[in-house]
Image (tube, rainbow, N blue to C red):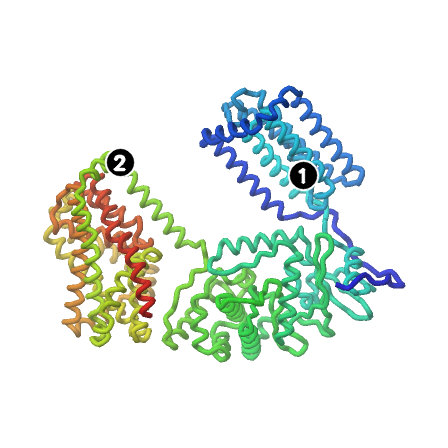
Amino acid sequence: MVGSQKAPANPPEILDRAPKRIRDWGDLAKLALFLILSALVVICALWLQNTTNSIESDVQKVSYPFSWLVLLPLSLLFNIVLSLIVMAVFVQLLVKRMWIPALTAALALIVGFCVSVVCAHLFSLYRLTSFIGAGGPSRFGSFDASLTIMAFLTASNGRSLRNKLGWAWKVYYAALAIVVIASLSTVPAALMSIFMGAWIGLAFRLAFGTPGSGAWGAQLASALQACGMEVEKLERIDPSQGEVISCDGAKRSRYYSLFSGGKSYLMAVNDEQQHSLRYLKQMWDAVKMEGLTIRHDKSVEAMAEHHYAVLMALEKLGGEGPRPVRVGAISDSAFMVFEAPAAPPKRPDPKSLSKADLVCLISSLNSLHEKGLTHRNISPASLARDDNGKLFLVGWSGGDVISSAAHKRIDMIQLLALFATMAGVEETMEAAKQVLGSSALALLSPYAQRIVIPASTRKEKGWRKRVLKPLKSSLEEAAREEDQMLQTVRLARFNLRRFITVLLVTIALVVVFTQLNFKQVIKAIEGANPWWSLAACAIGLLAWTGSGLAFGIFIDKSKRKKHHLGILGTQAVASFAAVSMPAMAGPIAVNITFLRKIGYKNTEATAIASADTVTEFSTTFLMFVILGFFTGQNVFHNLIPNKMIIIVTVGVLVGLVALAMAIRPVRGWIKRKCLPVLKSYGSMLGRLLSHPMTLIISMVGSIIQNTALDMAFWFSLLAFGYHLNFIETLFLFLFANGVGSAVPTPGGLGAIETVLSTTFIGVGVPSAIAVSATLLFRLATYWLRMALGALYMKYMEKKQLL
């Protein structure tokens, strides 16, 4: 930094005015925090009384050396000290003519006292000893005073007064600590007074605002002079003016035109009081997104330093953009000075965008990505056009110079989504394909997710919620052209599907354990046969052989002989993949990955995996129908009066289909969405029937798999001393396992347990035995196989088969 310079001959012309009050939105986050802490104190006092009392007892033991304080009139002294704090703070505010802070503090004082009286009455009414103590009101007299003064100090102590009123906080906390040590207040009551008083004071600070703590006018001129710039004129300009595009300021920045040394400059200033919202947004982005590194600029100085480094890197790498000349900080503000171009850039008209514009900017961004630079927030406000008509990016305050591949792809997705909104998907994809090629576009497809698209892009007229889907479809088509397998990338930590999954698992667990009679379960476990339990585990592993046979028969003979252990291994790994995928999705994903590793193209691998899936579904359905005709009348006599369960089921299904087809909108949706899928499965079955021996062997494998899994459940029942006809068990198992697997939870977790236990309870199996056998079955066929699958996956990865 350049040292201080001589004062200019003429005083600078400064056209700026500092606001009297500013809302610091960081106070909103603190208010929410103190509300949560207040609620936690109440919860601990109500439901964790033993823990609270133990903490109280420990505090009393630690404070025993100070027991002599009881001899002093502490209650009187405490109130005198707090009264002196109030008067001293009021005097300090009024002497400085800070009328609004004084009014805010007075209102907070009154409201805090009213709230403390109400709380004290409620605590005494409900006899909450954690707050009033075992000694009654004598240990509660300081609560109202401490809460009131906390609200008062918080309301009067904005960012600009933090250092000036620091003495008041020290005296307050020291007095409150002495009161707790002397047993005039319980620990929960002291904490409650602090937390409640804090959020009351913060609420008033938000309502009335606090004095500005940033640098304005003459302070900025002084800081610029310290940076080596003699200020001739400093004038605040409106953010809506076109010239601020060259400033590259962050959101909620203020802008100035600056004249120094006969040259014209532009300056962007950011204040700490406005930076709180930016920091909270960064924190929220880090919470709602996973798999990405999110920057956390804790202060405006840190943000300015990083922004300056990004812009200098942009200039060094030959990118077009704003050109900074100075950066600095003063008080609670950070500023950056930029060159003012002779012809200020303009915002491009969306209708004026041509294919050449798209190609130019996509190529420019791709070049910067190759050198490690990313923008991180490409939105409509990021586009600018210079006097030569060339498009370039602005708004690099969130950019970075060291970037992962994920951030680069998200950058490109944001740009393509913006262009698709303004110029159309087809033209955007043509330009992108011309610059990047199909192979690079294929890698972008997994990142085409709504969560990475800035809100301002989604608010554009051309968005209409129909841009992202066709854009993603075009990128997936590019992947198919390059025969690349589409990977799934999860970026959103919170989404509807995950919420539904958690909800379903919770409901399932509640349903299972509300039926659980623990006395009966303990009695059943004590009498369980360990050999049947081991047999259930062993036969569960045998099921891999059946599924491996059903899958491997579709693979070429030469590859099947070479990779027979890998084929069996895919079934083991699929059991591990079930921990993060729905029951049927795991095996399909693992099979396709394995097939690609052993030399199949993406289309061939998908066809083989689809054939295996179709055969498995068809075999299971046929087994269910055939067994139902022979066992349904006996098995379901406790569930429904009708003995023709399969016929009734088919009749219900036909009725539902007829009803759906009679409704025009539903019929249209079925034609658009369902019929193409059914046709593809029909053609797949047609090709399978043309190779009857392959189909038969695959079906035999599926039968072995289903039978082995059923035997595992049957053995689980036998382990708890309950015998059920094996064929009837197989029929019921196929029904319950199929329904449970259809629920989109990882590995059918929760759903399968619920359906299996309730189904067998419905046919007369005692609830404790049904639930216990179900848990043993899942241990043998889900958790144990998942652990072994994780070990086998390491082997498969080592052999480069996954």
In the depicted structure, whether residue 264 falls above or below residue 523: below
- Which secondary structure, mark 1? helix
Q: Position of residue 211 (x, y in %)?
A: 72, 46
Name the mark on residue 11.
none
- In the picture as drawn, the residue positioned furthest to the front comes out as 65
Residue at the disc numbered 1: 155
**Camera-nearest residue between 556 and 338:** 556
Q: How far is mark 2 from mark 1, CA to CA?
A: 55 Å
Given the current orientation, which residue lies at the most extreme right position? 9
State which mark lies toward you, 2 or 1.
2
Side of 349 where 405 appears, left or right: left
The location of residue 619, given as percent across then percent down, is 18, 62
Give neighbour class at mark 1: few <14, some 14-19, many 20+ (Cα, 10 Å).
many
Instruction: Check disc 2: other Cα within 10 Å, few if <14, some if 14-19, many if 20+.
Output: few
Report helix, strand or loop for mark 2.
Answer: helix
Question: Looking at the figure, which quarter contains the N terminus?
Answer: bottom right
**Disc 1 marks which amino acid?**
Ala
The image quarter in which residue 245 lies: bottom right
Residue 191: image quadrant is top right
Residue 200 can be seen, yes or no? yes
Residue 539 location, x and y as percent? 18, 54
Can residue 421 be seen in this snapshot?
Answer: no
Pointer 2 with pointer 1, Cβ within 8 A: no
The C terminus - image quarter: bottom left
Which amino acid, mark 2? Answer: Phe
Q: Is residue 632 above or below residue 418?
A: above
Q: Earlier in the sequence, mark 2 or mark 1?
A: 1
Measuring from the top left, give residue 797's x and y in whole percent. 33, 66
Q: Is residue 666 left or right of residue 711?
A: right
> Disc 2 designates what residue?
518
Above or below 313: residue 70: above
Say whether residue 222 is left or right of residue 428.
right
